[in-house]
Amino acid sequence: MSTYTICSKTAGRARIAVSLLLAVFLIACGSSAYNESKAQAQLSAPPASANSSATLATPGASSRIPVGSATIVKSYPHDPKAFTQGLEFFDGRLYESTGRTGQSTLRECAIETGKVLRSVALPAQDFGEGLTIFHGKIYQLTWLSKKGFIYDVRTLKKIGEFPYQSEGWGLTHDDASLILSDGSNQLRFIDPTSFAVTRTLEIYAGNEAVTNLNELEVVHGEIFANIWHSSRIARIDPKSGQVKAWIELASLTAKDPHEGEDVLNGIAYDDKTDRLVVTGKDWPHIFEIKLDDTSTNGQNPAKTQ
C-alpha cells in the first residue's frame, strides 16, 4: 500500500470524524432550542390551575387575555352523588344530566333545597352527558353512543332520539342551533330539526387551540365553557371562536374536598332572575356566583350582547 493511499484514508477518516462532531453539535443546539421554545410556551401560557387542560402552543399568544375571578353570592345544596354533566334553568327549575354507565339520569331539581323532583334513568349502556332545553324539548347527549335523547320538558317523557358523529360532551343552544362539544377544540352547530351540522367553530386563546371543552352555556350571546380537569371557564366569542376572558374558580373548587373526576362541570344561567350558578361532579353544593370586572370586561354577562 502506498504512502499516498494511507494518507488519503487518514484524511478521509478525519473528515468523517469532523462531520460527525458537527452533526452532534447541531443536534444538541437544535434540541436546546426546541426545549427553550417549549419552556417559553409553558411560561407564557395564561395563568391556570395546575390541572388545566387548555392546549397551549404559541408563546405569549394568550398572555393578553384577561383572567378574572368570581365571588360566591349564595350556595345551595346539591346531590353529592350526582355526577353532573349538564345543567340548565327553565321556568325557574333546574334541570340536570348526570353520568356514569348504569347510573345516568335526567332530573328536575328544586335549587333552593336540592330536592330531586323528577328523574328519568337512561338505558344502562348509555353514559349521560350534556343537556339543553330548546323550544319545549330537552336534548340530552350520551358520551360514546353517538346518539342523544329528546324529552318533553313538561312530562320528561322520551319523545325521540338524534344522531351525531363525534363523542358527546357538552350541549347548549343559541337562537337557531344546538351547540355541541366533544372534548376537542371544536364546537359543532347542529340544526335541531334535521340534526345536520351547519357550522363548525374552532376555539382559540390567541393562536393557541383550547381543547377539552366540556359543559356549555350560552349567556346572552356568549358561550361559557368548562375546561375539563381545570378550575377555569372560558368565555368565548361565538363568531370568531376566540376566548375573550378566563374565569378562574380555583378558590371556589377549594371549598369542598374533591378527588379524581370530581371536577368543576356545570354552568347554568337564569335570565329571569339574572343569576349564574356553577357546580361540579359529585359536589355537595351549587354556587351562585358574581363575576368580577376582569372576567366580564367591565360588563355583567346578562348585559353582554
Image: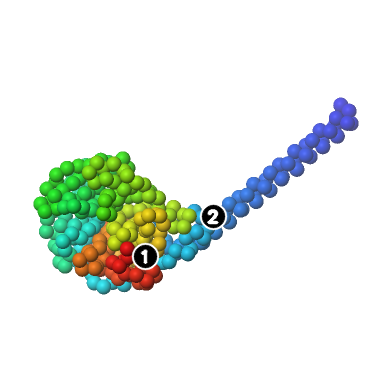
Q: What is the residue that sits farthest to the top in this orientation? A: 1
Label 1 crowd (10 A; few <14 / some 14-19 / many >=20): many
Q: Between residue 17 and residue 87, name the one nearer to us.
A: 87
Q: Picture coordinates of residue 141 (x, y %)?
A: 25, 47
Q: Picture coordinates of residue 171 (x, y %)?
A: 27, 52
Image quadrant in which the N terminus is located: top right
* Mark positioned earlier in the residue sequence (2 or 1): 2
In the rendered structure, the answer to whether residue 208 lies left or right of residue 97 reads right
Label 2 crowd (10 A; few <14 / some 14-19 / many >=20): some
In the rendered structure, the answer to whether residue 73 lies left or right of residue 211 reads left
Seen at 37% across and 52% down, the residue is 212
Q: Can residue 49 be seen in this view?
A: no
Q: Between residue 258 and residue 157, name the one nearer to us.
A: 157
Q: Mark 1 points at which residue?
A: 247
Seen at 82% across and 37% down, the residue is 11
Residue 99 versus residue 79 in the image, above or below: above
Seen at 78% across and 39% down, the residue is 15
Q: What element carries label 1?
A: strand
Q: Mark 2 points at which residue?
A: 38
Residues at marks 2 and 1, CA–CA distance in whole angstroms: 25 Å
Amino acid type of disc 1?
Ile
